[in-house]
């Protein structure tokens, strides 16, 4: 498609301001309805969802049980298998986990927060599609084709970050916390009894932190398409990026080296992937410019 044809396409998609506002209202109504349905469904299953979020806590308790199994030595590899759910924990030695709430309606409001968070996650494809349909008429055809892969990559990367938290990071954080307990030492007992609201805050904060950090390739690729960054710039700034990644990991994660490395190492890998993505975008843009020059 030539530049003239693209200009005609943009002109054909133009509409009065009132029509744009009417379309925006329709998109917002659909998004609000989707969020409402998602909230009601998530609230109906809020207890089951909360129990699902407690699985990392159970795996952490299982790691403690493996450490304390009498007569059996368990190395770091055994603990890793336990945290990933690949090694059975002896039920007879596995401690039960306890959470508390200190206000009459605290768990109810915790379920409401959980349902709201779940509704955003579940309805994200609908929200993203409505946003795309609203802005698509103002984009050239090649821009729409370039925009679509990011709609797919963004939730996939977010889920990858969430999976890293759920299966590896959170169990290790809770295992570290459970190891600070003082149990069976004379008459003193110091046990971990997290509040239901505090536990949900920890889980959602880690999920959002890792999920957003995993958007690095999407963000840098979009900046590369806009010409704000290039592969050479990103490569030359690698040393500063390494420092920035470790600083962000230290801020977003609990204060232990395992948690920081769990976010920092994938962050460095994602930065290298971002450089490759930006380089591929530049290569494609050069090829398109060469074809247009030949056609002209």
Image: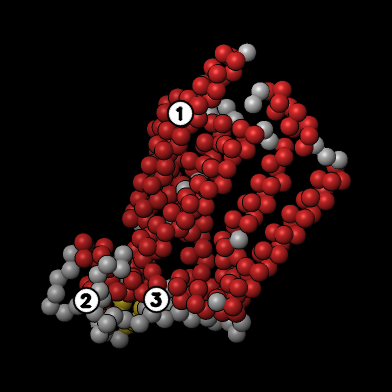
- Foreground label between 3 and 1: 1
Residue designated by label 2: 68
Quadrant in the picture for the N terminus: top right
**Residue 172 visible in the displayed image:** yes
**Residue 195 visible in the displayed image:** no
Against 216, is 260 above or below? below
Front residue (pair 174, 77): 77
Decide: few, some or many residues near mark 3? Use Cα within 10 Å; few <14, some 14-19, many ≥20.
some
Residue at 45% x, 79% y: name it.
99
Tag 2 or tag 1, which sits nearer the N-term? 2
Against 203, is 184 above or below? below
Residue at 57% x, 70% y: name it.
114
Indicate the quadrant where residue 33 lies.
Answer: bottom right
Against 148, is 45 above or below? below
| Residue 167 placement (x, y as % from top left) | 37, 62
Whether residues under marks 3 and 2 lie with C-beta atoms below 8 angstroms apart, the answer is: no
- The mark total stands at 3
Residue at 30% x, 86% y: name it.
187
Which labelled disc corresponds to residue 279?
1
Residue at 49% x, 77% y: name it.
48
Drawn side of residue 108 relative to residue 168, left or right: right
Tag 2 or tag 3, which sits nearer the N-term? 2
Measure the alpha-carbon separation of dots 3 and 1.
49 Å
């Amino acid at each position: 498609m030539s530049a003239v044809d693209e200009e005609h396409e943009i002109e054909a998609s133009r509409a009065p301001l009132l029509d744009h506002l009417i379309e925006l209202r329709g998109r917002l109504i659909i998004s609000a309805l989707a969020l409402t349905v998602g909230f009601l469904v998530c609230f109906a299953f809020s207890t089951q969802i909360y129990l699902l979020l407690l699985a990392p806590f159970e795996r952490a308790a299982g790691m403690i049980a493996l450490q304390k199994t009498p007569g059996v030595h368990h190395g770091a590899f055994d603990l890793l298998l336990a945290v990933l759910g690949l090694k059975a924990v002896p039920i007879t030695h596995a401690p039960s986990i306890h959470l508390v709430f200190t206000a009459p309606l605290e768990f109810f409001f915790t379920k409401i927060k959980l349902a709201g968070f779940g509704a955003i996650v579940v309805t994200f494809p609908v929200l993203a599609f409505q946003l795309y349909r609203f802005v698509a008429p103002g984009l050239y055809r090649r821009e729409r084709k370039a925009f679509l892969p990011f709609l797919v990559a963004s939730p996939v990367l977010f889920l990858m970050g969430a999976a890293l938290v759920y299966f590896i990071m959170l169990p290790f954080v809770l295992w570290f916390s459970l190891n600070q307990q003082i149990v069976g030492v004379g008459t003193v007992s110091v046990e971990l009894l997290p509040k239901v609201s505090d536990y949900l805050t920890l889980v959602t904060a880690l999920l959002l932190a890792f999920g957003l950090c995993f958007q690095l390739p999407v963000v840098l690729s979009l900046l590369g398409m806009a010409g704000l960054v290039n592969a050479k710039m990103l490569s030359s700034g690698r040393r500063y990026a390494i420092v920035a990644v470790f600083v962000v990991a230290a801020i977003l994660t609990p204060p232990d080296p395992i948690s920081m490395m769990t976010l920092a190492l994938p962050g460095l890998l994602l930065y290298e992937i971002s450089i490759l993505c930006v380089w591929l975008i530049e290569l494609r843009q050069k090829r398109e410019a060469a074809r247009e020059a030949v056609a002209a």
